[in-house]
Amino acid sequence: MRPVIIAHRGASGHLPEHTLAGKALAYAMGADYLEQDVVATRDDKLVVLHDIHLDRVTDVARRFPARARADGRFYARDFDLAEIATLRVHERTDAEGNPIYAGRFQSAGEDFRVHTLERELELVVDLCAEGGRSVGIYPEIKHPAWHRAEGVDITPLMLEALARFGYTDHGDPVYLQCFDEHELRRIRHDLGSKLKLVQLIGEDDWSTELTNFAAMRTQRGMKKLARTVDAIGPWLNRLYRHRRKDGKNTPSGLVERAHNVGLAVHPYTFRRDELPPGFASFDELIRFSARDLLVDGLFTDFPGAVLQLFRRIF
């Protein structure tokens, strides 16, 4: 059985991230799950956006130049949904406005917009009805502690939105993900959610969450996680070791430790235009991950390319 393909922010290697067009394209390319990163607006609406900021993927600085905070960033939480809906979405850029991935979609003539979680879930319903196959969803609660400090408890809003579309039980085609281990425990044990939960695992020097990722990666950490979650979403680079002496890549043991306690492993992010150290091609990376690491799923910006490779491997 092949690993599941999770379309990371849609078919984001081909169209701007978290656009409805990108999600429809990912479905057409054969993705098993579509990812939704979710943040809250000033009027407590849930929008699909990777960051709590708007300035790296929209024209907010041009349209609302006086609305930046003291740090120079434009926060989704400072705008009503009606205002955010006027923004145009473009390929992700750095602080100077340069595209992160220069070879990706750069047309200035398309009218991509930020949309609500509800609108995307409506799209999923329509795609499944018209496309003849089902696709799952893979929402992430972004920075729940930060949102609470900003005056909104985003998690119950997320669970309510999912429930309106029938996502309530463990067997439903949904994984709910978060970097915040405390929030995942709250979701399972305090809020009583039956949904499949995924602990995202980053690096301790990346995160603003009060989470010890290094401890999570140990066998003891995996055992603790298994009391709450169904899967882990680790950074791809933590799954293997690259030996410069002979050029070989070997498993780090993280996948095995997760499997030992019944956790599935869905690493991020597989990009054809950003290979991790030790790999000369996307084909080599996918084969190693599927055949040697035995991952259960993977997040990718290129779902169509991964499916084509899987058809040759499996």
Image: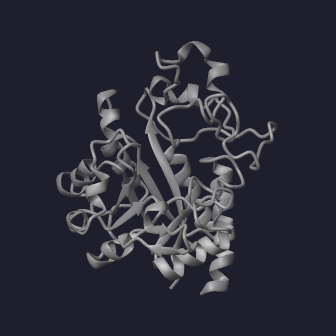
The percent position of residue 30, horizontal first and vertical second, equals 64, 71
Instruction: State the residue in front, 227 or 77.
Output: 227
**Height in image: 3 above or below 139?**
below
**Height in image: 169 above or below 182?**
below
User: Where, quadrant-wise, is the C terminus in this rendering?
Assistant: bottom right
Residue at horizontal 59 percent and vertical 55 percent from the top = 123
Name of the residue lying farthest toward the left: 190
Q: In which quarter of the view is residue 147 placed?
A: top left
Q: Is residue 203 left or right of residue 149?
A: right
Name of the residue lying farthest toward the top: 66
Instruction: State the residue in front, 168 or 111.
Output: 111
**Height in image: 281 above or below 314?**
above
Instruction: State the residue in front, 166 or 208.
Output: 208
Name of the residue lying farthest toward the front: 245
Q: Is residue 46 left or right of residue 95?
A: left
The percent position of residue 254, horizontal first and vertical second, equals 36, 69
Q: In which quarter of the view is residue 27 placed?
A: bottom right
Instruction: State the residue in front, 182 or 267.
Output: 267
Residue at horizontal 31 percent and vertical 48 percent from the top = 180
**Height in image: 213 above or below 146?**
below
Residue at horizontal 62 percent and vertical 47 percent from the top = 17
The percent position of residue 197, horizontal first and vertical second, equals 33, 61
Residue at horizontal 43 percent and vertical 62 percent from the top = 238
